[in-house]
Amino acid sequence: MYSEEIQKLLDKNGIKVGDQIMLSKGATQLEGELMPKANIGGKDTVIIKMKDGYNVGIKLTSDLKIEKLSSGVANIGSFPKVALKHDKSAPNVTLIYTGGTIGSRVDYETGGVSMLLKPEELLYKVPEIQDIANISVDMLMSVASEDLSYMEWVKIAESVTKAFNNGARGVIITMGTDAMHYTAAALSFMLRNLDGPVVITGAQRSSDRGSSDGFINLVSATRLAAFSDIAEVGICMHEQSSDGRCIFIRGVKARKMHTSRRDAFRPINDKPMAYVDKNGSISYSKGYNKAEAKKPSTLELKTKFDPKVALVKVYPNSDPKIIDFYIREGYNGIIIEGTGLGHAPVSTKHDEFMWLPHIKNALDSGLIVGMTSQCLYGRVHPNVYKNLRLLSNLGVIYCEDMMPEVAQIKLCWLLGNYGKEKAKSMLGSNIAGEIHRRLEFDEFLV
Amino acid sequence: MYSEEIQKLLDKNGIKVGDQIMLSKGATQLEGELMPKANIGGKDTVIIKMKDGYNVGIKLTSDLKIEKLSSGVANIGSFPKVALKHDKSAPNVTLIYTGGTIGSRVDYETGGVSMLLKPEELLYKVPEIQDIANISVDMLMSVASEDLSYMEWVKIAESVTKAFNNGARGVIITMGTDAMHYTAAALSFMLRNLDGPVVITGAQRSSDRGSSDGFINLVSATRLAAFSDIAEVGICMHEQSSDGRCIFIRGVKARKMHTSRRDAFRPINDKPMAYVDKNGSISYSKGYNKAEAKKPSTLELKTKFDPKVALVKVYPNSDPKIIDFYIREGYNGIIIEGTGLGHAPVSTKHDEFMWLPHIKNALDSGLIVGMTSQCLYGRVHPNVYKNLRLLSNLGVIYCEDMMPEVAQIKLCWLLGNYGKEKAKSMLGSNIAGEIHRRLEFDEFLV
C-alpha cells in the first residue's frame, strides 16, 4: 500500500495501478506503468515500470507531479478462453509449454516479472498461430529455465515423443531463455532419429512490454514446426535486435550471447539452419537432417543422464584442487573450459596453480576428461603446442569445435546411455551435429 | 630419427629437415615443411608441418613420392645480433618481452611450437619498429601465457613502471595470447594514473608460418606506444582475419573469442579505443583517458593481489556444493558466472541443484559474492525477475556489464589493496573502464 498522501494524489488524478503515467520533478520526466507498492523504496515512493522493463521509484515531494497518460491494460484479469480450432487440411503441431518469459507477466506483488500467463492467454495474445496449424497445447510445467534440471529435460523429451506418436508433424517448446541452449543440446541428444522439426522458442522481453519479441518468435516457430522439413532440434529466435526475420539455430550449436537483446541467441561455429521471414516464408541455409514422412515415427528416446559431469573453467591463478573435489564427490567426468586451443597450466613454476598432476589424478581415478575452449568460437587442437601435447598424451580428449556446455551435456548423456568405455570413444565423434569437420570463414560472431 | 628407408628417399631427393616438400600418394598431395622425426607415428612415418601449422604424418609405402619444393629457412640457426638504434628525435618505447607465440618457433624435438626466439631475433624479423621509435628491450621472462600467474603480472607491472620512470613515452608488452586479456585486465587495475599507452600484443600464428600476424601486430603496437595519446592499458591485435588494420581494445573489455583466428580478440560491451592502419595512421574511436605529459610520471603501482577469489559457473545440473568447497579452502570471494541477467537456481524443486542456501552460506561466512553473466555481452540486473531479487536481497553484488573474468581479477585486486569492506563497496563501481553506464547498440558481436 502506498502512503495516504500518495493515494490522495493518485485518486485526485484518477490514476489506478496499471495505468500509464508521467512523473515530473524539476527537469526530470519519467513515463511508465504505475506499479503497486512493492519492496523497493519506502511507502512514500511512487513506483513505475518503465518501457525498458525496469522499475523506478520516485520519492513524493511537494514538487512531484503525476499525470495520467492512458488507462492500464496490463491488469486485464482473466482472458477469455480461446477455443482450439481444428482444420483437417492444416498440419498438426503440438505446443509444449514449460514456463519462461514468453509466458510471463508483471507480478504485482514484487514488481518483478513472474510466470503467470496461462496457455489460453498465450493463444489469445497470438491468435495467428491457429491460422497456421492445428495447435494442441501440452501444459507440461511452469518452471523458470534457470531452475530446469535434466529431470525436466526428460519430461520434455517424453512429451515430444508423445506428440510425434500422436500424429504431430512438428513440435514447439516454449520456455525461458536462460537455459534454452542447454535444453536444446540435451534434447538434441535424447531424441534420436527425429523425423520432424522440434522448435524451441521464447522471449527476451516479457509480454507486457511493447518491445516483446515473443509473438514474432512464436509465429515463426509455428511456421517451422508446421512447414519446414528439418528433422532436428533447434532454437527459433530473432535474427536481429529489430523485428525482422527469425533464425533457426541447431540445438547443439546455439548459445545465449547477450543478457537482454532480442537477437541474443547466436550460432557458434555454425550457420543458422533456416530463416523465417516476417511474411512467413522459410529459407534454408545449410545442410541439415531432412524429415521424411515415416509412419510410425522412427523417433527413439534415449533419456538416461548421468549428472556427475563437471564443467571446470581454467583461468590464471585458478585452483586445480577443484579437480580433486569432483573426484571425491564421485564424479565420472570433467569437461575443462581451457584457454585458447585447449590449454591448462602444465608448465608453470607455481605448484599451487599447476593443473597437470590434478588432471592426471582424475584420469587415473577413471574419470573421463574432455577439453574445450573458453574462446567458444574455433576448435581445440591437441598438437600445436608442447603444453597441449602434455595434456593429450595423458589421455585428455580434445572435443573439436564443441562448446563447453554442449560437451558437458553430451558426456552426461553418453555416460547415462552407453557406459564409460563407449562414452570415452564417442565424446570426440559427431552425434547430433555438435562437431563439424570444417569451420567456415563466416561462422565467427554472426 | 627416421627409418633407414625414409632417410634414403630423402637423401636421394636432396631433402633436409626444414625444406618445403610435396608428399604424393595416390590422389593425395600434401605440401609442407619436413619435420624431424617426432613423437607422432612410427619411425616409418614422414612428418610435415602444413601451412596451417598442423603436423601431418604419412606412412612410407612403395607409392609414396617425395618432391623438394624449396630449401628450408626455418632452421636458420643464430640470428645476427641487431644493434639498437638511437635517434634523439624519435620517441622512446620500451618493449617488455614475456614469451608466447610471437616469440616462438617450431621445436624440432617435439614438432610442436616452443618459446625459442630471442629478443634480437624479434628485432631482426621486424626491423621496421626501430624506424618508428627508439626501442629498449626488457627481456623479462619467457613464459607461455597459460602458465602466467599474478606473480608474473606483478613483475610486468613493475617493469612498466620502471620503463615510464626511465623516460619511455609508451610501453609494448609481447606475450602469449591465451591469457592476454586476463593480463590486460590485471595491469589495468595495477597501473593507476597511467600517463602513457601500455600496448599488449602477440601473435595467433607462430613466426615460422607465412600467415603469422605477429609482425603487423608488433608494428601497429609500436605506433600506438610511440604516438598515441591513450593513457590506458590495451590489446593491439588484428581487426580482421585478413591483414589490414589493427584494433586497440581497452584491457578490461577485451576477450579472446576464437581459438585460432588472427582477429580473435574482440571488445565486449565496448568499442575499440583506436585503429592503426597499415600505413601507420592512428584513428581514435571513443572516449579514453588522454595522456598528459607529466614529469615525473604520475603512475602509481598497486600490485597487491588476493588470489583467493573463485570464478564459478552456473549451468543446469551444476553442483552448488562447489561453493562450500571454496569456503572451506579459505576463499574470500566468489564471482558467479550466472545465466542471463544474473541467475542461479534459487527456486528449483531439486535440492541437489539449489544454489540459494549455498550462496547464503558464502555470504554468511564473510565472502564477497559477485554476479556476472555467462552471456558475456550485456548487463546483469538485480531486479527484473523474482529469482534475481532473491539473490540481490541476500547481498550478492551485481557486476553490471563486467565480464566474469574481469570481475574475478578486480575482486582479487580490491581485496589485496583495500581490504574486505572497501572491496565490497568498490566491486560494483567503475575503476578502470570495466563498467560502462550505457551500452551502445553497436557493441554486440563486433
Image (spheres, coloured by chain):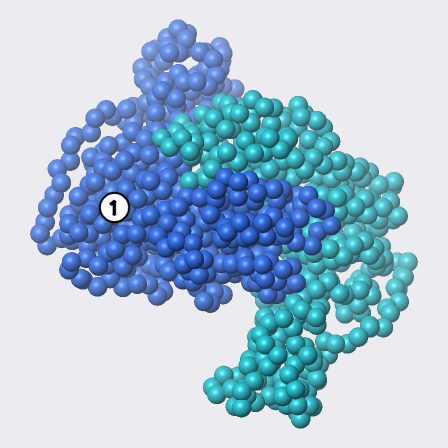
Chain colours: A blue, B cyan
Query: In the image, what residue occupies the spot 64% across and 83% down?
Result: B3
Q: Is residue A163 visible?
A: yes
* Chain ID, mark 1: A
Task: Classify residue A21 by image quadrant.
Answer: top left
User: Seen from this angle, which residue lies furthest bottom?
Assistant: B12
Task: Classify residue B237 by image quadrant.
Answer: bottom right
Label 1 secondary element: helix
Query: In the image, what residue occupies the spot 19% across and 48% down?
Result: A163
**The N terminus of chain A, quarter of image:** top left
User: Seen from this angle, which residue lies furthest front?
Assistant: A365
Q: Is residue A391 above or below residue B51?
A: above
Query: In the image, what residue occupies the spot 80% across and 37% down?
Result: B300
| Residue A254 image point, x, y percent | 41, 52
| Residue B45 image point, x, y percent | 59, 80
Give the crowd class for mark 1: few <14, some 14-19, many >=20 residues within 10 Å.
Answer: some
Q: Closer to the camera, A357 or A164?
A: A357
Q: Say left or right for B111 vs B258.
A: right
Residue named by callout 1: A158
Q: Closer to the camera, B304 or B38?
A: B38
| Residue A250 image point, x, y percent | 36, 56
Q: Is residue B146 visible?
A: no
Q: Is residue B416 above or below residue B61?
A: above
